[in-house]
Amino acid sequence: MKKRVLVTGGAGFLGSHLCTRLINKGHEVICLDNYFTGNKKNILHLMDSPFFELIRHDVSFPISLEVDEIYNLACPASPPHYQFDPIQTTKTSVLGAINMLDLAKKCKAKILQASTSEVYGDPEIHPQPESYRGAVNTIGIRACYDEGKRCAESLFFDYHRQYAVDIKVMRIFNTYGPNMNPEDGRVVSNFIVQALKGEDITIYGDGLQTRSFCYVDDLIDGMMRLMNSADDFTGPVNIGNPDEFTMLELAQKVIELTGSESQIIYQPLPQDDPMQRQPIISLAKQELDWEPKIKLSEGLNKTIEYFKKQL
Ligand code: NAD
Ligand code: UDP
């Protein structure tokens, strides 16, 4: 059935892939973005569609629309960007959640929140199940993002209990792929851009910290399955690829796949940088029949091709 779908943060990395998939499925899409980290170039190919609309708006202010579904993705996701104006980051997460939940309540729309593995902070439990409550430094430089997202999760469940709003909460683990901003500052885009330009590859700390990287197509598949999941399934649910790598292994893989002559250099580890991260995805398998299909090398090759065209 054709639906009218609002995607906040739709001009960003994940949002632009989601908009494309929704349009391809025959839905009407309203993309809302303030272009803080997003780019119109990511959605340029959709502009000619009569079913695609673009609104420049900041989610920390209310808006009135008629929609059937809302994917709430608006929020800078890379540490340098969310730390650039940390107070605005908290407002985007918290006021953005309130405004989008009020909209969902008013028009009886189903709403999905792009939450994050960052709600687990620097986890003492490894790998992380949804039941783990996390270890976040509430006064650290990552708190604007982590606590903003944690508060947004609380708001989603309170609107669900208090007003019966139909919610879906997704905890996204590190995702990469085409449409990442080359200046984004996240590790995959940094390493690929550095390798392609022949610049030094910057590892923060000793490079032994780990992350588990999911290719964007798998992630968006999980996100849409969650939106369409059983009415009584709210999540939170982890969506990510459990294959875990150290940042040193990632750097070596990027050098190998690009054939670059870049050297690895070591820079200080930022404050509160999590040491390890890997999702347990049994809940996603059980409730959404979802698991990632794309291996790191395959996904990196697609991403490298994208950045070659950009540079
Ligand atoms: P991104 O920075 O590429 O996209 C975020 C988008 O939101 C951008 O287009 C930006 O301009 C927009 N935006 C920011 N503040 C806004 C505001 N106040 N009002 C309107 N628009 C605003 O990041 P992404 O990787 O695409 O992440 C999308 C969502 O997924 C974010 O909520 C992020 O927290 C979440 N997430 C992403 C990852 C990941 O690895 N990519 C991991 C965990 C969670
Ligand atoms: N990182 C790195 N070099 C870079 C960028 C990031 O070594 O140029 C490290 C960073 O310190 C962290 C990991 O890579 O340990 C993942 O960083 P990213 O910002 O991509 O995601 P997050 O820390 O939010 O998971």
Image: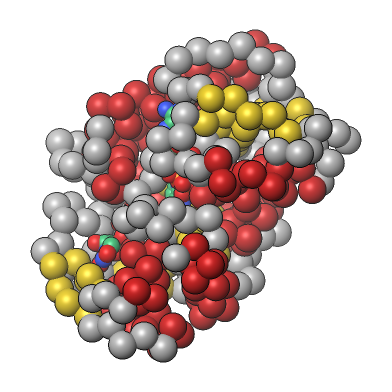
**Splitting the image into four quadrants, where does ligand 1 fall?**
top left
Which residue: 46% across, 23% down?
A: 58
Which residue: 53% across, 55% down?
A: 179
Picture quadrant of residue 105: top right
Quarter of the image with the N terminus is top right
Asked whether, in this view, residue 201 is left or right of residue 69, the answer is left
201 or 268: nearer the viewer: 201
Indicate the position of residue 60 as horizontal and vertical percent values: 42, 20
67 or 208: nearer the viewer: 67
Picture quadrant of residue 235: top right
Indicate the position of residue 168 as horizontal and vertical percent values: 60, 36
Which residue: 57% across, 48% down?
A: 42
Quarter of the image with the C terminus is bottom left
Which residue: 31% across, 88% down?
A: 261
**Above or below 80: residue 264:** below
Indicate the position of residue 279 as horizontal and vertical percent values: 45, 61
Whether residue 281 is visible here, answered yes or no, is: no
